[in-house]
Image: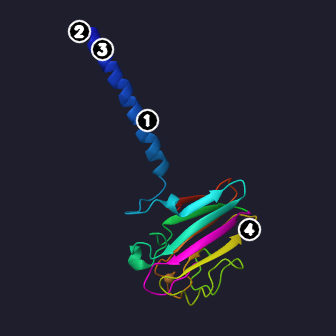
């Protein structure tokens, strides 16, 4: 009887350790990223091919009315960070799900009212005027061969100021990622 109890206690101890280990590992991964309430899974919005050095991003303006509709994929004010290796070909598929003109283009981090993308071709057409509700547009560009801090932002005047941007960092690392928060 006493032996059976000891075995049971040992099993419980091992299981307890396993749970504790798992918990501390996962909290370690998220500790540096601030939580964003009601955030969609970022993996939904990016597909990449490491062999071909390509990535496709879905950028939906006013995805879920987050931030009063001034969001991309439910994120605003840089709550989402895309990390893209150097020399990648990136295709952006834009949809305006909002009720006013919006756009998307690659701009320098912190730019306030950019009149065009920082890399030629890295914006939808008529990016400053914006495209009307229900529009879609696609563009592709190549990331530079050096690290850089950019944003994917709405170029309609005033929309960056109210938070309509996510972070886009060009990194020396081996693979793209899309993470909640600013690493
Ligand atoms: Cu906008």
| CB under 8 Å between discs 2 and 4 | no
Report if the beta carbon of the residue with label 3 is closer than 8 angstroms to ligand 1.
no
Rendered image: mark on residue 1: 2
Which residue occupies the foreground of this view, 47 or 151? Answer: 47
In this rendering, the answer to whether 47 lies above or below 62 is: above
Rendered image: mark on residue 6: 3
Which residue occupies the foreground of this view, 17 or 142? Answer: 142
Horizontal and vertical percent position of residue 56:
62, 65
Q: State which mark lies toward you, 2 or 1.
A: 2
Q: Earlier in the sequence, mark 4 or mark 3?
A: 3
Q: CA distance from mark 2 to mark 4?
A: 70 Å
Badge 2: residue crowd in 10 Å (few <14, some 14–19, many ≥20): few
Rendered image: mark on residue 21: 1
Left or right, 87 with reference to 183: right
Badge 3: residue crowd in 10 Å (few <14, some 14–19, many ≥20): few
Badge 1: residue crowd in 10 Å (few <14, some 14–19, many ≥20): few
Task: Name the residue rendered at 46%, 51% in the picture.
Answer: 30
The reply to whether residue 62 is visible in this rendering is: yes
| CB under 8 Å between discs 4 and 3 | no
Q: Earlier in the sequence, mark 4 or mark 1?
A: 1
Report if the beta carbon of the residue with label 1 is closer than 8 angstroms to ligand 1.
no
Horizontal and vertical percent position of residue 125:
63, 85
Q: Earlier in the sequence, mark 3 or mark 2?
A: 2
Rendered image: mark on residue 144: 4
In this rendering, the answer to whether 94 lies above or below 27 is: below
Give SS at disc 3. Answer: helix
Q: CA distance from mark 4 to mark 3?
A: 62 Å
> How was the colour assigned to the protein in this rendering?
rainbow
């Amino acid at each position: 009887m006493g032996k059976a109890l000891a075995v049971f206690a040992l099993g419980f101890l091992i299981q307890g350790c396993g749970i504790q280990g798992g918990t501390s590992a996962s909290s370690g991964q998220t500790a540096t990223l601030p939580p964003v309430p009601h955030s969609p899974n970022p993996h939904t919005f990016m597909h990449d091919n490491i062999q071909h050095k390509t990535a496709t991003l879905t950028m939906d303006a006013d995805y879920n009315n987050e931030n009063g509709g001034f969001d991309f994929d439910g994120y605003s004010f840089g709550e989402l960070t895309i990390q893209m290796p150097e020399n990648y070909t990136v295709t952006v598929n834009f949809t305006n799900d909002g009720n006013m003109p919006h756009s998307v283009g690659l701009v320098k981090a912190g730019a306030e009212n950019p009149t065009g993308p920082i890399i030629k071709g890295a914006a939808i057409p008529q990016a400053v005027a914006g495209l009307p509700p229900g529009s879609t547009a696609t563009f592709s560009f190549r990331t530079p061969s050096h690290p850089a801090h950019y944003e994917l932002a709405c170029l309609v005047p005033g929309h960056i100021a109210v938070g309509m941007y996510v972070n886009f960092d060009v990194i020396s690392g081996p693979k793209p990622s899309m993470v909640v928060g600013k690493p």
